[in-house]
Amino acid sequence: MVKHIDAIIVGAGWAGSIMAKELTEAGLSVVMLERGSERTTPVEGAYPESIDELRGAIRKRLFQNLSQSTLTIRNTMDQTALPYRQLAAFLPGEGVGGAGLHWSGVHFRVAPEDLRLRSAVIERYGEKFIPEGMNLQDYGVSYDELEPFFDKAEKVFGTSGEAYKVQGKIVGDGNVFSPDRSDNFPLPAMEDTFSASVFRDAAKNAGYHPYSLPAANASRQYTNTYGCQMGPCNFCGYCSGYDCYLYSKASPNVNILPVLRQDPRFSLIPNAHVLRVDLDSTKTKATGVTYLDTKTRKETSLSADLVILGAFQFHNVHLMLMSGIGKPYDPISNTGTVGRNFVYQTITSSRVWLPPSTYTNQFVGAGGAGVAIDDFNSMNFDHGPLGFVGGSPVWVNQAGVKPIAAALGAGGGGTPRWGSAYKDSLVNTYKHSLGIDAHGSNMAYRDVYLDLDPTWKDAYGQPLLRMTFTWKDNDIRMNQYVVSKIEPIARAMGATKMNLVHLNAGQPFDTRTYQTTHLGGGAIMGENPQTSAINRYLQSWDVSNVFVIGSNAFPQGMGYNPTGMVAALAYWAAHHIRTTYLKSPGPLVKA
Amino acid sequence: MEPTLNNPFRRSVVKGLLGTTSFWMASGNARWAEALAAEAAQPYQPAFFNAAEYQFLESACERLFPADHNGPGAKALGVAEFLDRQMQTPYARGENWYMSGPFEQGPANLGYQLPFVPKDLYRKGIAGVEHYARQQYGKGFSALSALQQDEILTALEGGSVQLGDIPGRVFFEQLRTNTLEGAFADPLYGGNRGLGGWIMLGFPGARADFMDWVNQEGASYPIGPVSISGETA
């Protein structure tokens, strides 16, 4: 006997939790399946056990356990992809809350032109400006359409920030490049750490436009739209990689699930690894999902009218491939869409040393707090003479540097990595330096994609996902250009020494060192079913009762952190499911 | 049952705790800190490494992280003890690494591709270094001068030495990583003795409340560290 529910949601992170809240509000019965374990902040987040660096970020307590499932990675199509055996370059989450439990909390909207980047580039520079092999595409949704949902998400996340323009009026010292807002941030901006304040002054003096990073770290006590409460952030520094013991960093666990769990229409099943979405014989309608209880190893099928994929970016793509939803992308024939436009971000971290009398106290911090400039992001500067597409915000985002992480990263680049000279440099670097990041975009290319690996399998017998990815010339040159802008700012900050880090021409993607968990694309949204896997409402073009919510929808990797955009897209999709789809289930856009 | 200081079963409970996946990966473990701290305060008898291996670690870790004008070295910080304790955890068994074959070697930038988990790397790596030391210098590693030990470590780091099945560089990186973890992890795990690692860096440990120190114009934070179990220095 197969149990029937109105909607099944795969994944208990931000995307899944938002969709579950919206669909239960619409009166649907919802079952949310999470392959990892149950996690609640009063248990895992309790001080002081939660702030143990070894058990936390180092032994990777809140991250995906690769022993059960991972992916394989290669740089180019002529290589054999090899398994990503140890977490390093990126850190997907696992367990209730997903990556939304261990994220930092930088909570951006979107640069409006990033949503129509292909159109914007052609309008300004002509079609020939787009390099051969670059799959530059528009999202098919505009900032004005998404604005109410960015606003809604900020009021759920308790986002701290300083606005520039609200309803057409300049209201504050916010990001001059940011678009108009219908309302202010729910909370005032986070205070600048010392390092961020030094960057703010130097960037301003250099003629740039510094602004406070929008942070889903509560600068004040806050009660959100759902009645969930957050406490003020005290800059303890345990955001990224940790569960916030102060209830200051927004997470599904703190900001949505406490109310959802009380709703009789909602149930959450942890330790439930979804193996596939079940389709009917026409392959155009999902009938439910089949999952494995990872404790009992028992398979269960659930039937549902609506299936929402809200797992991490590449897990959504994997599930589509395993289920036969949409046509797999083939880079040779340039056909199919599932796996197409896999993107990352182009991020490098530089370091600046201040005089020995100045202490940067790097352990003080908040994951979402900091000061940034957008002068070299998106379409905010003239790419014409530079000949590349994309850009990077530049920022000081002192998130709280812990001692093991600092020690592992110290030395190298021609300086000792052990011994007494190493200790000198570690101590000096920890006490007196600060980091500046170029947090940039990454474009999509015909030969960068996701498909199924021919050799390696997960613990459940399914083929691993295969990632074919490396750095391309366009993005390397973008990164080099933006990093060159850091030097004068660093000098103005009073740098006694600096280590400016940028990608080098021909440098391959290295899986061994952390870069970012901001993976995107692979099942992108768009206006054309030939070049996108899901429509502008994040609905599968091929199986109309499946919606795929997450950064998998991004046609390009943008310079901003993705969570704010994922949340807005979830609310956008939910709105159209509630107002249109449920009244008359079927495709919301004609293919 | 919650481990407490008065509980006669404390030691076995704590030992069990560190060996479990749930401690490292899943739920919280209320009040385990005081039990682990008491365990870490006991005189230590290595359980994974034999006496010769332990002696190698005492010597090699001290060269990687030597006592100097900055502060204590690996030996004073209890790094070898930390390593031995870690060998009894899921980490040492590679329980969150993908360890399914086939194991094919490829370009270094595609990451670790050996069929060995950390405890294998130590067992094979230490034997390999001891063999290399005898071959090159006619003595075991610990009997060599600091200069000779540094020469060996430099050769391992540089990638010119193969230790049986294991590239010397792989073993070097494993040892460096775990040595630095032992110097700077909370003292609960047997290293960072007396909070010596944290004092060196000016890291205040589990204070985790800097409301008044968000921006003090570059002044040095004035309060010393505290550990998770409440130890101060």
Image: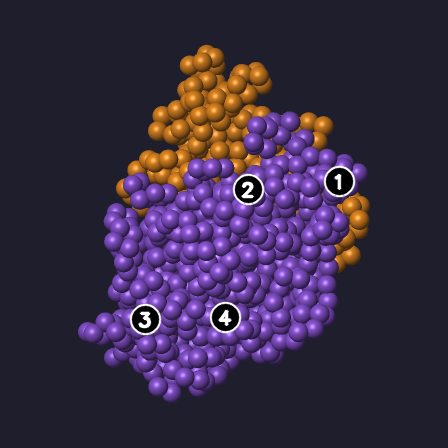
Chain B shown in which color? orange
Instruction: Indicate the position of residue A521 as horizontal and vertical percent values.
Output: 41, 59
* Residue pictured at 78% horizontal, 56% vertical: B212
Going from N to C along the chain, the mark reached first, 4 or 1, is 4
Residue matched to label 1: A494
| Residue sitting farthest toward the left | A281
Instruction: Give yes or no for contact between labels 4 and 3 (Cβ–Cβ under 8 Å).
Output: no
Instruction: Indicate the position of residue B73 as horizontal and vertical percent values.
Output: 64, 30
B124 horizontally vs B101: left or right: right
Q: Residues within 10 Å of mark 1 (few under 14, many from 20)?
A: some
Instruction: Give yes or no for contact between labels 1 and 3 (Cβ–Cβ under 8 Å).
Output: no
Q: Nearer the viewer, mark 4 or mark 1?
A: 4
Q: Nearer the viewer, mark 4 or mark 3?
A: 4
| Chain name for mark 1 | A
Q: Marks 2 and 1: same chain?
A: yes
| Viewer-closest of A547 and A46 | A547
Instruction: Give yes or no for contact between labels 2 and 1 (Cβ–Cβ under 8 Å).
Output: no
Q: How is the image coloured?
A: by chain
Going from N to C along the chain, the mark reached first, 4 or 2, is 4
* Residue pictured at 58% horizontal, 63% vertical: A108
Q: Quadrant of the C terminus of chain A?
A: bottom left
Residue matched to label 4: A142
Q: Marks 4 and 1: same chain?
A: yes
Q: Nearer the viewer, mark 2 or mark 1?
A: 2
Q: Marks 4 and 2: same chain?
A: yes
| Chain name for mark 4 | A
Q: Amino acid at mark 2?
A: Gln
Residue matched to label 3: A541
Q: Is B167 above or below relative to A565?
A: above
Residue matched to label 2: A480
* Residue pictured at 38% horizontal, 87% vertical: A583
A584 horizontally vs B25: left or right: left
